[in-house]
Amino acid sequence: MNDCIFCRIIKGDIPSAKVYEDELCYAFKDINPQAPAHVLVVPKKHAASVLELGEEDKALLGHIQLVIGKLAKELGVSETGFRVMTNCGSDACQSVKHLHYHLLGGVQMSEKMV
Ligand code: 5GP
Ligand code: ZN
């Protein structure tokens, strides 16, 4: 999608600090990090959120979870802990309408989720 900022990042039209890429997903540093380690993991397939995915995307979603685990190790937060989050819709303040998973770590986080 030409008007989607993350699709443009995946295509390379907008620069990003890439940390990982394979045929299904792309990961890059968040431009406004909320933790010492803050990476966004996005499927290359455009979908606004999990609400737009279906049975045919099960393998993609599982793959992304495994990539997140691999990146947590590479980023050095697998031992200390990390948080994985996806915002969906207005109550969750989703600002970019392309499914993405925040991988946050490197700091003691609050027990509170909201
Ligand atoms: P959301 O609020 O939708 O869950 O998260 C969107 C995230 O994308 C935010 O944390 C924001 O900082 C990040 N972001 C928005 N635009 C860009 C960009 O152009 N480059 C990078 N690297 N991150 C972006
Ligand atoms: Zn997109």
Image: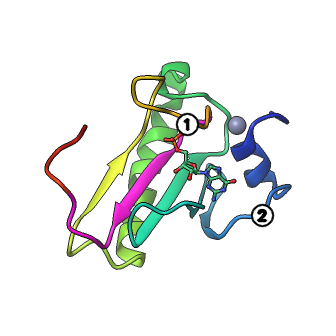
Work out whether residue 49 or residue 60 is closer to the camera in this orientation and state it.
Answer: 49
User: 91 and 85: which one is in front?
Assistant: 91
Instruction: Mark 1 vs mark 2: give the one in front.
Output: 2
Magenta residues, start to end: 98-109
Quadrant of res 113: top left
Residue closer to the observer: 3 or 50:
3
In the figure, 33 relative to 99: above or below?
Answer: below
Q: Which quadrant of the render holds ligand 2?
A: top right
Q: Is residue 6 above or below residue 26?
A: above
Left or right of 44 on screen, residue 51: left
Amino acid type assigned to the residue bearing label 2 in the image: Pro
Q: Is residue 18 left or right of residue 40?
A: right
**What amino acid type should be assigned to the residue bearing mark 1?**
Leu
C-alpha distance separating marks 1 and 2 = 19 Å
In magenta segment, residue 108 = yes
114 left or right of 41 in image: left
The residue under label 1 is 99
Mark 2 surroundings within 10 Å by alpha-carbon count, few (fewer than 14), some (14 through 19), many (20 or more) = few
Residue 13: image x %, image y %? 86, 55
Q: State whether residue 15 is above or below residue 97.
A: below
Q: Please tell me the numbered disc located at residue 15.
A: 2
Quadrant where the N terminus is found in the figure: top right
Q: Eyeballing the image, is 102 above or below 93?
A: below
Percent from the top left, x then y, of residue 41? 52, 53
- Is 100 positioned to the left or the right of 77 in the image? right
Of the numbered discs 1 and 2, the one sitting upstream in the chain is 2
